[in-house]
Image: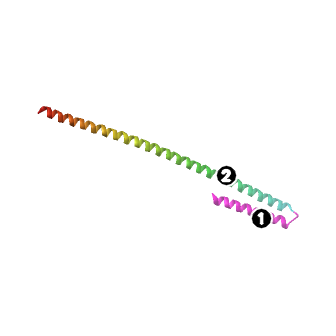
Amino acid sequence: MSKIVATLIAGLFATSAFAAQSTATAPTTTQATKADAKADKDMAKADAKEAKKVAKADAKVEKKAAEAHADVAAAQADADKTKAKAHKKAAKAKADAGADKAAAHADQKADTAAAK
């Protein structure tokens, strides 16, 4: 985008220098030089409009990219939260299973001790 802006600025300087040079050398302006000046002015306006539209389009693309990046970041945060929650539930289930296993083992020992 900076290359486009630099090109447009250089074009504007070139057209302004050309217009200033042509008016200084020919004090009496003819229809042809007026038409040339008007054409140059119109071309400069068209270049400026193009630069503005290009900059606007680039900004739109950058905005969409930023929004997409934000969406990805939000999705990643949600995924991390879900993973942490799943890990917590799994740890709790493992602890409960371990406690149940220990209780069952203790009950079995008590049963075998009572049976003797």
Q: Position of residue 52 (x, y in %)?
A: 68, 53
Q: Which kind of residue does numbered mark 2 sit on?
A: Lys
Which residue has dot 2 on it?
53
* The residue stretch that appears in magenta: 1-28
Q: Which label sits on residue 17? A: 1
Most foreground residue, 25 or 95: 95
Question: Of callouts 1 and 2, which one flags the residue occurring earlier in the amino acid sequence?
Answer: 1
25 lies above or below 5: below
Quadrant location of residue 29?
A: bottom right
Q: Quadrant of the N terminus?
A: bottom right
Q: Horizontally, is 48 left or right of 87 in the view? A: right
User: Residue at left 77%, top 64%?
Assistant: 17
Percent across and percent down for residue 9 are 70, 60
- Give the residue at x 63% y 51%: 57
Quadrant in the picture for residue 45: bottom right
Q: Nearer the viewer, residue 21 or 76?
A: 76
Image position of 16 with respect to 89: above or below: below
Q: Is residue 86 above or below residue 7?
A: above
Q: Are marks 1 and 2 in contact (CB under 8 Å)?
A: no
Asked if the stretch drawn in magenta spans residue 46, the answer is no
- Looking at the rendered structure, the kind of residue marked 1 is Ala
When asked about the image quadrant of residue 25, the answer is bottom right
